[in-house]
Image (cartoon, rainbow, N blue to C red):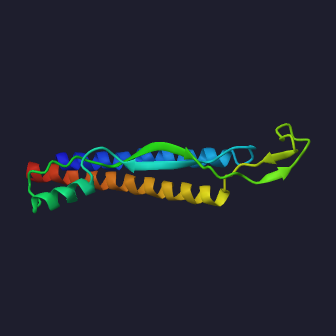
Amino acid sequence: MSSLHDSFEIAASGVRAQSDRVRIHAHNMANIGTPYFKRTIPVLTEGGGVTFSDMISTIQRDGVLSMGIAASPSGVMMEGGVQDPTDGQKIYQPDHPQADKNGFVTLSNTEPMSEMAGATIASRMYEANLSVISVVKQMANKALEIGRGQ
């Protein structure tokens, strides 16, 4: 059952990461009209455990894939986000309270279509991970039925 548990863990990490990713996109969207706001770009990384490249390195080193390789679930992690360094559009508004000494205000660098696309992709990946959890749950139930001899 440990492989089923690992499958749950991997899918759950995907659910958590995509949920965080949607929150970042929503925060960016909420600040489209905020002068000087710099959008955050979500950063996802492979979770802990044995990575695919580690497995390939082991295969190349040992020559064969032995049953003794201990692979733990990797999944995905939200590392946080990085600030987009690009500047937003500058507009001349000398009466604006946040205008610089030349009368310009820098608008947010958030692109609504890009944020909507990112949020949509994250939402679909969230749903896909929920589907994986559902399938693994069905597999676990079926294994229990078989174990009981039914």
Residue at the (49%, 42%) spot, across then down: 80
User: Number of numbered discs present?
Assistant: 0
Residue 112 seen in this snapshot: yes
* Looking at the image, residue 34 lies above or below residue 150: above
- Which residue is most to the right? 95
Q: Return the x and y of residue 144 as percentages of the image width and height.
A: 15, 49
Q: Return the x and y of residue 95 as percentages of the image width and height.
A: 91, 41
- Which residue is most to the front? 102
Residue at the (41%, 48%) spot, across then down: 15
Residue 18 seen in this snapshot: no
Residue at the (71%, 49%) spot, across then down: 108
Q: Return the x and y of residue 96 as percentages of the image width and height.
A: 87, 41
Give the side of residue 101 with respect to residue 146, left or right.
right
Q: Return the x and y of residue 137 as percentages of the image width and height.
A: 27, 50
Q: Quadrant of residue 100?
A: top right
Of residue 64 and residue 136, the one placed in the foreground of this image is: 64
